Image (spheres, rainbow, N blue to C red):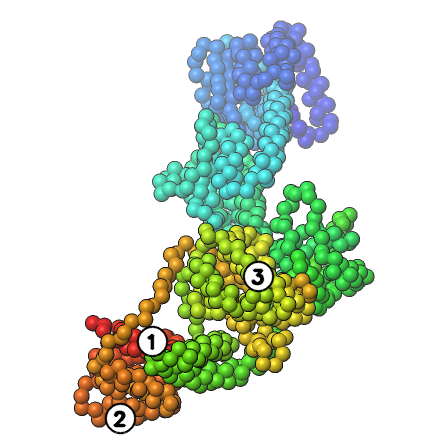
Amino acid sequence: MTPKGSAASKKDQQAKKRRSGKTIARDIKDGHSARALEFRARYVQAREGALAPEHDRDDQSALLELLDLAVPSFADWCAIDMVRGNGTLERVVERHTRGEQGTESGELDEIARRVSSSGRSEVWHAPPSAEARAVVVGLRVNGAPYAVVTLAVDEGSYAYGPLDVTVAEEVVWGVGDAIERLILHQNARSAVRGTQKIASQLHQLIAVSITVAGLRSESDILTSLAASTRNVFDADVATVLLESGPAVALRGFAERGKPPVCEPVEDSDVERFPVNRSTSSSPWRDGDWLVAPILERRGHSKGVVAVSRRSSTEFLPEDNEVLTLLAQMAATSLGAAELSRDIQRSEARWRILVETAPAAIVEVDLEGRVRWWNRTARRIFAWPAFDPGSSSEPPRFPDSAISEFSSLWREVLEGEAASGRDFIEVEVKGRRKELTTSATLLPSREGEERTILMLVDDVTDQRQLKAEVRHAQQMEMRGQVASTIAHDFNNLLTLISGYAEILSRDLADDDRSLEMVRDIQSTASRASLLTAQLQTIGRTKSLEPVVLDPVAVLQSNAEVLVRIVGNDVELKWALNMKSANVRVDAGQFEQMILNLAINARDAMGSGGVLSISVDMETVDDARADLLDLPPGPYVRIRVGDTGAGMEEETRQRCFEPFFTTKGPFKGTGMGLAAARRLVEESGGSIDVESEAGVGTTFEIILPALDDIALEKGPTPETAQPRGSATILLAEDDEQLRRLITQVLGRNGYRVIEAQDGERALQLADEFEGQLDLLVSDVVMPEVAGPELARTLQSANPSLRVLMISGTANSDVLEELLPGTNAFLAKPFRPSELIDRIQEILSRD
């Protein structure tokens, strides 16, 4: 027979066709090939039925159908050998009418191999009769060898003729076409299912991307992605691992039938879940898991997304792409969460920076309406706190600043990149302030309203500080002079007070002389107030604050105040007996009240009303900003008069040291300066309200305390016992040394005099007895008092020390032996000196 696709000449093909036609016609006439026609008819019927492409069958079913068509009607034995990838044949099915094994022939097997290779059908002639007992036909699918079909008849059956061969080829090749159609149909259905699966996955991926885009917590992102990954793959288990981040390592986990969770990674997770490969940038297989890395921008893996396959499902190549997309979503979402956190931190830092900025920051629209302001602007302009949700009218700039600010805004709108103004004077709630300001136009996006950003700085205190620094430089020399004057003047006052007290005892029976002596003592007391003010200005005397009741202090000084103001001035009191205590230097507090009363009296030359009040006040945040004090409870003391009042310039300068309007020899200008120092160093504030022709009121604010006030009762005048101790006296003022020696001698003490510290050391070294007490001035040439005391106590630890000074304070005792020393400020009376000596000598 002529194989399909033979290259024989056209003449040979035509000759063979004529011979074949004659043979087939003879066979039909003889009835030998009725089986071939029946085979063909059955095939045609099967092609319209079971072999139709719309039937959901596979290629193996088609081969079995061929077997059913061939045996037993056309062949007694049929075998089908599949062509494998390496070209070898593998018998997959065979059938015999009697259930016997098929024909065993090496020659037949060789023919099958040749047919699988060439594709041309061959007939096997079985010996010895050499009849055509088998037809071997190659079955090709999509142009490639697919199988070899061997059809054979047993002995006793008709041998195969040309018609049998032709029909066998027709049927086998037709089954090949049917298999092609079946495979094509199956591929099409698989493609549709794949497309549907991809469409479903894409839909789910879009939903996942929308969901995780709004999440800002790593835990929420991992939980959502784990659940979404399991759903996308319809898997039993999915996990998302985050190894690096702001928190500990986390794992999102989703299992079929259970709610997804996110938990910290544990050591046992290594055995249950895939391990991250930091060097891999593409998906990989890990047992039953498909794993994809979560890559950062630098290509470093910060975790993995992994899904476990179901037992009946294999991962396809497109699954790698889907899992890669999920991993990219994880990286994007986790990066967005970290970026959002960084933005929030930056915004928080920016808000803190703006709110705590020392300059006011204000945003205004192009009409100058305030849109936003920070805390410093609130303090400078006395505005409320900024509330973005408030519906109330926004605050306005002071009227006195509108003109300068409007000019500044025009410059910015006309194209100036930034513009500024120095020293704009405004008044905020009655307080004059000096401001510097600059402005710039804020950038805006298209369609947005443009705004102006202003920086405003309150330089009132800075300019005042500069003025104070300049004044302090001028005052430094004055303070040194004041300190020297106070030192010498206190020595003189000690002499005056001392001799006056001695005279008062000697003239006890002479009333007229005794009255004059008391006038001398009163004058000395008034002079001591002046020296105290000098020391305050010179900063040579430290405050010694104690807890006191201001109402009680005013009541105890009421009689003195009545005498000071005179009969022409009416004194009105408004004292809240439930007011709290304050902590302040007691002596300087009394001096401040007396000075304010004297100033009020002098301002009311023709008489008037002096009002003194004490009450409680709770300072809120707004008032605290104005007073530059912490909010809280305070004691408010007011001293007001109905006198001449002050002009604004005078009011601004009234607290300056040495500034006075009383004229020569009528005022020192130190009283109010000393008052301000006392109040401010006591944690309070002092202010003045005055109007020319109406009067003046001083307001003092001091922190309220719950501490118990120190009670100090009057000291009775009693006869002092005589002493018997030996005292070394070191004083460089000869007259004061002579007075102290006389006072100590009159009280029974033995005195060794030294005109300075160096002489005192020499006398102490030469003295053969026991020195009981050292009385020494603090400020002396060569060897100062504290140095003298330390030297003597190092040799004699039992030596008691009394330091006296008109400029220093008790701090000079800090380096001396504790419990063995005392301090006495000049000026002092002889009785005070004796009391202090007896007290220190009586210590154990």
Q: In this view, does 545 lie to the left or right of 25?
A: left
Residue at the farthest right position: 414
What type is the residue that disc 2 sits on?
Gln
Q: Name the residue under label 3.
A: 570
x, y percentage for residue 730?
A: 32, 87
Asked whether 165 or 51 is in front, the reply is 51
Q: Mark 3 to mark 1: distance in Å? A: 36 Å
Instruction: Give the secondary structure at mark 2.
Output: helix
Q: Mark 1 points at which residue?
A: 832
What type is the residue that disc 3 sits on?
Glu
x, y percentage for residue 664?
A: 61, 81
Which quarter of the figure is the N terminus placed in? top right
Mark 3 and mark 1 lie on one chain; the one further toward the N terminus is 3
Residues under numbered marks 3 and 1 in contact, where contact means CB atoms less than 8 Å apart: no
What residue is drawn where x is 18% and y is 88%?
A: 769
What residue is drawn where x is 39% and y is 37%?
A: 272
Mark 2 and mark 1 lie on one chain; the one further toward the N terminus is 2
Q: Name the residue under label 2.
A: 762
Q: Mark 2 to mark 1: distance in Å? A: 29 Å
Q: In which quarter of the image is residue 806?
A: bottom left
Q: Mark 3 to mark 2: distance in Å? A: 62 Å
For the residue carrying disc 1, how many other residues have a C-alpha within 10 Å: few (<14), some (14-19), or many (20+)? few
Report whether residue 690 is seen: no
What residue is drawn where x is 44% and y is 67%?
A: 585
